[in-house]
Image (cartoon, grey):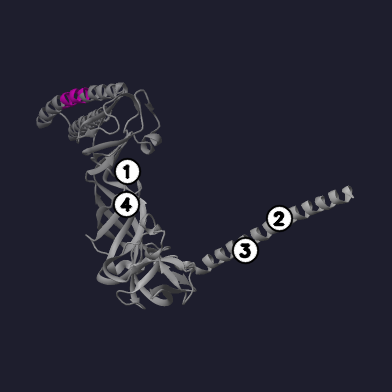
Amino acid sequence: MLKRIVSVLIAITVLGGLSVLVVRNIRKGIEDKKAALEKQRQIASMDRRLIVGVSPVARRDLDRAFAASGTLVARTQATVFSMVPGIVLGLKVEEGDEVKTGDVLARLDAAKSALGYQQAQAAQAQARLNLENMKKNFQDIRTLYDQKAVTRNDYEKMELGLKVAEQQVAQAGAAVSLASASWSDATIRAPIDGTVIMKAVETGDLMTSSQGMKTTPLMIIARLDVMKLEVHVPEKNLLYLRKGQRCEIRVDAYDHVFPGEIDQVGEMLDAVTKTLKVTIHIQNEPLTVKEGGQPRTIERPLKVGMFARVAIILEQRKGALSIPVDAIINRDGYDFVFVHKDGKVTQRLIKTGVTEEKLAEVVAGLTEGEQVVVLGQRALFDGQAVRLMEEDPFKFYESWGKVTP
């Protein structure tokens, strides 16, 4: 009897525990279900519209430009060669030095040239002595000829000998001048005012080969106050090219636009590319930059050999209706944009005109004041509901992606 009572008590206890577990699981399931329903409700109530950025269609001054690139060179530049062979005994300048016309740049070993000059002088002295002797003999024979003591043939022979002696003196004088020039060529002087931008020899180098002297320069001197850029412009733009036309030049070294102007427009098109050579001059004026937060002035910022990009301003449009270039989508040869109004976007075909780096003229399809999508436009479709970045509760636009008209 006692065993039965114990068994019943144990069974009741087990069943009670199971009941508690079942109730707890049921309550947890109900709570999880409520949480899931609440999450779904929150998700359903969220604004899932795509966030976009817009910019107004406005009137701005635009420039139509032709872009090209090339390598900067100095407008005035001279390449210095050696006219005579010899060892470089001394260099008077280094790269970066300023020189004036006639300044000594280098001296070559002139020993052989000096000997040649002395030899030419000796030959000239001998020719002069010979001429004096011939003059004396000619006077003597002339006296005898007047006295009928010699024949006319002997007289004419002596007269011819005198003329030959005179020619020999002239020839010896030319030889002296040539030897003197060769001797002076051993002293190399600056042909122009400017800056030494390249020095290809050092003291002790030997200039021997005549061909090498013609092809290997000693140094290059350039005037760096004005730089030159040559570009080739397509035939279709010839109507807009003229001397003095404004240009904008950029180089990778500086975040700066250097003003330039067209100096010369070629007269003959390239037979293959049908382009015309245009020469542009750029004033190499001092440029102030910031280095470590401190201003620093660079006297001649543009260097020979720099790669430069130029925009030749072909045409100016005042108050042109324009939009950012980023807003334009090209598909199948057509340009279109998305226009925002009342929380929705509409796809709109447009026709563009003058295009700058960041702005494009709108010839047809838009009116002033309309809002075009400039951020997120490639993920849109016609009639899609959107919201502006300014309406985003997280305000991401305050730190990135803010569209500035």
Q: Which residue is drawn at 30% across and 74% down?
A: 369
Badge 2: few (under 14), some or many (20 or more) residues near its Cα, within 10 Å?
few
What is the spatial separation of the Cα atoms under label 4 and label 3, in whole angstroms?
Answer: 65 Å
Badge 3: few (under 14), some or many (20 or more) residues near its Cα, within 10 Å?
few
Q: Judge by depth and name the residue closer to the eye, 214 or 80.
A: 80
Badge 1: few (under 14), some or many (20 or more) residues near its Cα, within 10 Å?
some
Q: Give, as a three-letter code, the residue at label 2.
A: Val
Q: What element carries label 3?
A: helix
Q: Mark 4 points at which residue?
A: 250
Depth check, mark 4 against mark 3: the one in front is: 3
Q: Give, as a three-letter code, the residue at label 4.
A: Arg
What is the spatial separation of the Cα atoms under label 4 and label 1, in whole angstroms?
Answer: 14 Å
Judged left or right of residue 115, residue 45 is: right
Q: What element carries label 2?
A: helix
Q: Give, as a three-letter code, the residue at label 3.
A: Lys
Image coordinates for residue 33, horizontal then vertical, percent: 62, 63
What is the spatial separation of the Cα atoms under label 1 and label 3, in whole angstroms?
Answer: 76 Å
Q: Are marks 4 and 1 in contact (CB under 8 Å)?
A: no
For residue 294, which quarter of the picture?
top left
Judged left or right of residue 150, residue 388 is: right
Which quarter of the figure is the C terminus placed in? bottom left
Q: If you read the primary sequence from the N terminus, does the residue marked by circle 4 or circle 1 appear first?
A: 4
Q: Residue at x 29, y 39 (%)?
A: 291
As drawn, the label of residue 20 is 2
Q: Do the residues labelled 2 and 1 touch (CB within 8 Å)?
A: no
Instruction: State the extent of the magenta-drawn residues as a range.
Output: 125-134
Image coordinates for residue 50, horizontal then vertical, percent: 47, 67
Q: If you read the primary sequence from the N terminus, does the residue marked by circle 2 or circle 1 appear first?
A: 2
As drawn, the label of residue 33 is 3
As drawn, the label of residue 304 is 1
